[in-house]
Image (cartoon, rainbow, N blue to C red):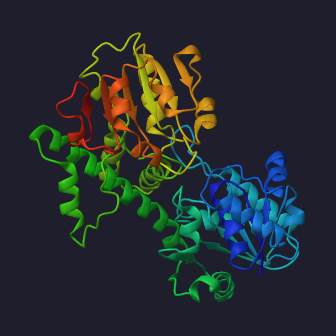
Amino acid sequence: MKICVIGTGYVGLVSAVCFAELGHEAVGVDIDESKIEKLKKGISPIYEESLEELLKKNLDEGKISFTSSLKEGLKGVEVVINAVGTPPDERRKVDLRYVWEAAKQVAENLEDYIVFVNKSTVPVGTAEEVRKIMEKSCDCFDVASNPEFLREGSAVKDFLEPDRIVVGVESERAKKVLEELYRPLTDKGYHLMITDIKSAELIKYASNAFLATKISFINEVAGLCENVKADIEEVAKGMGLDSRIGDKFLKPGPGYGGSCFPKDVDGLISIALDNNVNMRILESVTDTNKLQQILAVQKLKKYIPNLFGKTIAVWGLAFKANTDDIRESSAIKVIEKLVQEGAKVKCYDPVATENAKKALDNGKSVEFVGDKMEALSGANALILMTEWDEFKKVDLNEVKRCVNAVVDMRNVWDKQDFEGGSVNYEGVGV
């Protein structure tokens, strides 16, 4: 089956590469010509495990190609995957201008029947609007919803080994086309859920909002644990053993971030308000998360009340390990807060440094270094924000020789390793 994927960001590029890996012929389309040229050479613009390897493999096998011409990309395709960005606007509502434009241009360039599939995360009712836009130019199409459930850092694995595949359709023809699209996965036993379009559109929002709720909940419990001298790791373990709760997303930390959870929680709240429904729980979830994202600075000030002129090392800039994505990263917010307090920051991340440089414009207050131990040179304290494996394996004796205080926002290290020494240690809920 030949497919066209519009947009080569996280979702679009992973989808195009993985569909090619499943045996389809995929064409990736993007208006960014410099990105397209890199992709043609097998250079991925994002860091994602196994992605560049599979990109090069499928380029060599002729199963994937890239173009900046939508007209060229649509030739002979049966399915169009819409994976353009849906960023929040200034009111934190979902900005759908790129979705509307993609639908308009596809309709104007169609020659034969296609299924136009929204894979971008979009509000309930988006498919209806897409249909209205496309009907102005053609009538040989169906619209469907196929939300993605890809975790940054493991997106390729999530695509090729999915928990579930959700497809929303409104015609038997579209249903058969998408069943064929995902047959390489369903033949392996992976579950394909066929539902109506509006339900499919809402499933993604509801799923991410629920996971964000678990994160904010366990972080609030962690705060309670600190006050009553309980251990959040033990509390979370005991909760997770209940099959009704499960152990996923019960790890305390600096709050959720990235391109999905913040945007999707805000998006669901906005969708609800537009339909005269209040999402009070989710409003509290976002409030808790905002406080959690700067908790590291509050913890640090227990030991260094006046941060002015102090040098603070920060390990980890990405919002989570195994990605270079710094969108809504708690680390970025912590660094901004440290600078506001007059501190100098030396920071290190294995892969996210270049993206962080674009987000942090603080002159001489922020220094980016190429080695984690270099970041500790001359530092008064260390804040760990991202749980990269190399931080877990570090020689703690070296860390203790360099700084007076450690704030471990991922509970990577054991509090007992710091007891009886001269270095103050702060974890989350321990």
Judged left or right of residue 364, residue 428 is: left
Q: In which quadrant of the rendered view does residue 305 lie?
A: top left
Q: Can residue 210 be seen in this snapshot? A: yes
Pick the quarter of the image with the C terminus.
Answer: top left
Judged left or right of residue 213, residue 38 is: right
Question: Looking at the picture, does residue 27 appear above or below residue 92?
Answer: below
In the image, what residue occupies the spot 63% across and 62% down?
50
Judged left or right of residue 398, residue 116 is: right
Q: Residue furthest left?
A: 228
In the image, what residue occupies the spot 41% across and 22% down?
312
Question: Looking at the picture, does residue 413 appear above or below residue 160?
Answer: above
Task: From the top left corner, tell me how far across and down residue 387 is, in percent.
Answer: 42, 46
Pick the quarter of the image with the N terminus.
Answer: bottom right
52 and 413: which is toward the camera: 413
Count of picture labels: 0
In the image, what residue occupies the spot 82% across and 73% down?
61
Question: Looking at the picture, does residue 256 appear above or below residue 153?
Answer: above
Task: From the top left corner, tell me how far across and down residue 29 is, in percent.
Answer: 80, 59
Q: Can residue 279 be seen in this snapshot? A: no
309 and 185: which is toward the camera: 309
Task: From the top left corner, tell me how far across and down residue 127 is, in percent.
Answer: 62, 67
